[in-house]
Amino acid sequence: MVEVADLESQQVYKMETLTKTPIAFKSSEEPRYKLIAENIVATYNGIEAVKNVSMKFREKAVTALIGPSGCGKTTLLRCLNRMHELSKGAKVVGRVLLDGQDLYSNREDAIIHRRKIGMVFQKPNPFPTMSIYDNVAAGLKLNGVRDKHIIEQIVQGCLEMVYLWDEVKHDLKKPGMSLSGGQQQRLCIARALAIQPEVLLMDEPASALDPIATQKIEEMINELKKEYTIIIVTHNMQQAVRVSDYTGFMYLGDLVEFGETKQIFENPRNEITAKYVQGQFG
Amino acid sequence: METVKLKGGSPLFDKIFKIAAAVAATYILAIIALIVFQLVSGSYQIWAQEGISFLTGSDWNAVEGSESYGAAPYIAGTFVTAGLAMLIGVPISIGIAMFLAELAPKFLRSILSFIIELLAAVPSVIYGLWGMFVFRDYLRDWIEVPLNNALGNNVFLFSGTPFGLDIFTASVVLAIMVIPTIASISREIMIAVPNSQREAAYMLGATKWEVFKMAVIPYSKSGLIGASILGLGRAVGETMAVTMLIGNATGPQAFPTSLFGPSQTMSSIIANEFPEASQGSLHMAALIGVGLILFAVAICINMVAQLLVSRVLKTHQGAVLA
Amino acid sequence: MITIEQRAEFRKHFRNNIASRMITDKVIKGIVFGCVILAIIPLGSILLEVVRNGAPVLSAGFLTQPPGAVGSDQPGGIGPAIQGTLMLIGMSSLIGVPIGVLGGIFLSEYGNNRFGNTIRFFNDVLAEFPTIVIGLFSFAVIVLTLGYFSILAGTFALSIIMLPIITRTTEESLKLVPVTIREAGYALGIKRWTVIFRILLSSAKSGLITGIMLSIARIGGETAPLIFTILGSSDFFTGFDQPMDALPLRIWRLSLLPYDTATAQGWGAALVLILIVLTLNIGVRYLFLRKRGGGSRFRITAGV
């Protein structure tokens, strides 16, 4: 309530040039924030893709980032687990706090933090030379899990969580690439879940999939949010409505409006947000 | 005006042009076919005389009356030097490629790629000259003699009298010569690995090396093998530097037994003895026969390499277009 | 499904191995950087030695005079070798460039089929061929037929060596010409060969010149195929039926002579050769490759 209003007030100054709509926000309970992004500025070869965005993500909730393509939503997502800085010519300034700890405090920490913040990419990217089983177990071996029994348990558990276990339990030795696109994407989610992250970042996870596979992924997100903090980038507004509790609308690198999904879509406070959710541009 | 002029070509001309282009392209196939024909017919005499023992024998006697030719030592010498060059060159090349593709900052990358290409531009004969008058002394004094003193009596590999003109020197220089080839192709193959693969590994909390091991190597394995085989093809066919450095033994002495002993490769025996062989002699047929074996080996190696490399780079190009 | 308790249990199995993994990472990075240094040292050493040993011999006489008698006080120069190399480059280009460019046009414009793929494949194979075998071939076809060693046989061998490089770079640079330019030409009703010559080749000019210059740099350093074709000589060009000298061949012969003056001359000739080859290479790079962003597998490569 207060915090969200604070957060919004940071935007007010800038937004007032775009709109005269007053910004206020209401909520009833004391929220818990898992991940806090503060004053994130992300550049690509000197061009600002994200312009000083601050956001707080609630624990065990789904936050959707929406906006027209090129608005910086994917870049912002990639800043949250320090993936953006891996691209050539990319730089990030600002802080990202995971349970109060700054991810950007030193270089080495990126590797530890990435393990706590899993990520699912736009296109399924299983390791093509590895079997289904090895794909899921890949991160475990990296992090020193040696107990075969435990690995088996985790692999099965994670494949169950993405509703893939029943489909592949007899084919665990088959290459990950032998699966269909939707199955591959769920395999990638299982791979991300296997390292027991606390936050799950999803970059348009269903954009390359057919409607049935998309539906499965969405059901799964609804299930996963009971335990995980999920942040999902999507260009599909219906999807944002279906899966998310909170929605942030980004435009030209700015966070224009951030609030409960219902409010954003039914009663947007900002003119541009309203236009976007009504489908007047995109 | 210009348009009118451009239009003025008859369909016949179009056809003629197409045929001319096709003929030019076919020229390459014709040359390869002719090479095979010439090598076979030029060496026919030696196969008729020696039969299979030309491949297995080790005598090499050009004195008229007691002529006898066996190419086994040179075949062995070729594979030993080229193999050794691979052993030294491939890991270094992959390391260079990894540095250029994954680690180097932008400004360093272009400078280093340029330097590696310059290394490829140095003519073989200059490598030979440098090996003969400069590098050989360093190798002999710093590596060969100490190894020979320490292990020469026990390990046959290091036995003999280190002189600097031997299998070891030839192989090291060969390695230096194939590194640019292998490194630059490997680099391209690594760059062709989609970033999504690297990101998947990073996401799991991998270090740069682990990303390389987990995402880059498995994805590019066949291409890297192809690049290495291409390097092997170069090493097998390389002539001048080897001829100048390998010590040029003939007959049974040319069999590679010690790293520090002289030997001979297929290409070096041709380069060394061809000027002495009289036209139409059995000696010349034997040398052309060695050329035929070299041809067969090289074409096999190159075909495998081209298949492996072009497949990888082709799918990459397709991916870029898509 | 994984319960929360299970997850806590699983997390216990994760080892805090990050420190050791970072050390491994650093060690590997160090090794990899070492590989780069290891490859640069020979290049540095070669350039240094060639300049150090070669520069003192350089003089107008060295560049223009024929070699003196072996072991005499009058070492002479490498004039015939320079002349031979220049003539070989020029004559080989006369054969290799037109055929190579035409072949490249065929592959790019008409070669999108099985026949084209076959030629492309063998073209790549030929590019990596042991050049000594090509020398043997030229000996058998030209020297044995004509009955004498000559610059013609050397020209034939070197033209075969430069051919695949030119074919490939021509094809690559033609393919870089946007389809729209081609279509615009055809839409105007211009004949195909006119489109190719007037429009495509001029658009792809820089790539074409790159390929030609790279192939020249490559054959300029070739030695092995010259041994049985031009044979070597101490005289300037006297006729197309006479043996001829060339720089790389001269370097080899000089290196085998047991006289210090000969060795010094060898270094001098090496300096001249390396200047020619590297100038072509750096020139090409500076002029054209920058634009293309690299990526061609057909870069300059050493002679065998």
Image: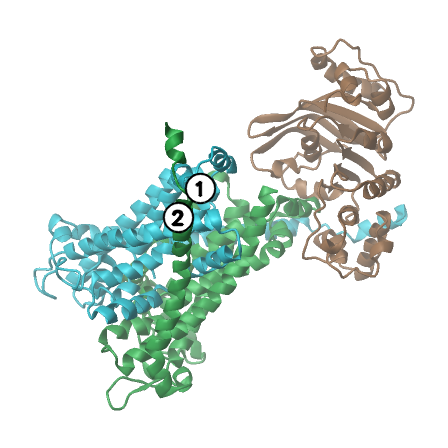
Q: Quadrant of the C terminus of chain A?
A: top right
| Residue at the disc numbered 2 | B17
- Seen as rendered, the residue at the extreme top is A20
- Which chain is cyan in the rendering? C
Residue A63: numbered disc: none
- Alpha carbon separation for disc pair 1 and 2: 9 Å
- Seen as rendered, the residue at the extreme right is A28
Q: Chain of mark 1?
A: C
- What's under tag 1, amino acid-wise? Arg
Asked whether the residues under marks 1 and 2 belong to the same chain, the reply is no
**Structure colour scheme:** by chain
Q: Residue C78: image x %, image y %? A: 16, 56
- What's under tag 2, amino acid-wise? Phe
Whether residue B247 is visible = no
Q: Residue A131's quadrant in the figure? A: bottom right
- The vertical placement of A250 against C293, above or below, is above
Mark 2, secondary structure of its residue: helix
Q: Residue A11: image x %, image y %? A: 73, 17
Mark 1, secondary structure of its residue: helix
Please name the residue shown 73% across and 55% down the image.
A176
Residue C192: numbered disc: 1
- The vertical placement of A25 against B121, above or below, is above
Tint applied to chain A in the drawing: brown
